[in-house]
Amino acid sequence: MPLMRDPRKKAEDISAAYELKEKLGEGSFSEVRVAQHIRSRRLVAVKCIRKRALKGKESMLENEIAVLRRINHENIVSLLDTFETPSKLYLVMTLLTGGELLDRILERGSYTERDASRVIRQVLEAVKYLHQLGIVHRDLKPENLLYDTPLEDSKIVISDFGLSKMEDQGVLSTACGTPAYVAPELLQQKTYGKEVDLWALGIISFILLCGYPPFYDENDTQLYKQIIKAEYEFDSPYWDEISDSAKDFIAHLLQKDPEKRYTCEQALQHPCKHTSHRCF
Ligand code: ADP
Ligand code: MG
């Protein structure tokens, strides 16, 4: 039974068109590899998904594909092509060569306010675009934000749409995401929507500026308690030199009440003393 009945999806083997090369990353259902388009010699990234490993979660993947097909934004990965064999599904995407934001944070320790603001502004523009389409990403974290090139001023791109969901299909309610980035309303099994992405952006902004997460406990139950209360601190000495403007920006994103939390538009309007742009 084919996974998708999509006329744009090709049934022939991907190896006729692309030469699969080294592995870039690995997830629970898939691996991502570099590949070269044989005719044009263009390099791409191919997400190879083992259908058997999906076991009933095919709709999650169909969803990722449907989402990606509708998207066209410079800060969101482009889906170029898809292939399917009886056992595997291949998503051909733009190759991003700059690595994960997580690795740059680990290399640098933390970002200056100016650099962090540049990253966050790009992600906010992309998330604003998604929200306008009624798409909630739900899994924003530094591992899913990739740099386009190894250059310092490379743009940042959102990848990995496995968990995103169309908002108009009803209230989003399955608990998902990665513990450290999950919003309070998600943990409390309340109804939730776009606001969960802004919470995750608050966590990412916090980590970029100081190099550690706002909520942390080795025990997940304790971690969830912290998150549900939205209790975090701008600890000394790490936050001493960071501007009130940046702290105010984060406070509006790590806002427990989703209705009071900043939207993308509000976050993009936040005054910034470091650049001519706004953000924080
Ligand atoms: P998963 O759903 O398993 O988390 P991802 O789509 O996040 O899969 O991909 C896993 C890893 O593969 C990423 O964290 C990244 O390191 C790498 N990767 C994914 N997409 C690309 C891409 N377009 N270009 C380069 N590397 C990529
Ligand atoms: Mg991922």
Image (cartoon, rainbow, N blue to C red):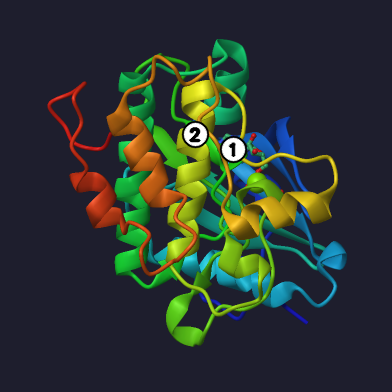
Along the viewing direction, whichever of 241 and 100 lies nearer the viewer: 241
Which of the two labelled residues, at mark 2 and mark 1, occupies the earlier sequence position? 2
Q: Quadrant of the C terminus?
A: top left
* 181 relative to 96, above or below: below
The residue where tag 1 is placed is 214
Residue 225: which quarter of the image? bottom right
The residue where tag 2 is placed is 206
Along the viewing direction, whichever of 48 and 218 lies nearer the viewer: 218
The local crowd at label 2, few if under 14, some if 14 to 19, many if 20 or more residues have their Cα within 10 Å, is many
Q: Residue at x 25, y 37 (%)?
A: 279
- Give left or right: position of 113 versus 7: left
Instruction: Give the x, y percent position of residue 128.
Output: 31, 57
* 173 relative to 141, above or below: below
- For residue 109, which numbered disc appears in the image? none
Instruction: Give the x, y percent position of residue 118.
Output: 31, 28
Q: Are marks 2 and 1 in contact (CB under 8 Å)?
A: yes
Along the viewing direction, whichever of 226 and 78 lies nearer the viewer: 226
Direction bottom: furthest residue: 170
C-alpha span from label 2 to label 1? 7 Å
* 172 relative to 16, above or below: below
Q: Quadrant of the N terminus?
A: bottom right
Q: Residue at x 69, y 70 (%)?
A: 175
Residue 190: which quarter of the image? bottom right
Q: Residue at x 60, y 81 (%)?
A: 5
Q: Residue at x 34, y 31 (%)?
A: 246
Amino acid type assigned to the residue bearing label 1 in the image: Pro
Instruction: Give the x, y percent position of residue 24.
Output: 69, 31
Q: Is mark 2 within 8 Å of ligand 2?
A: no
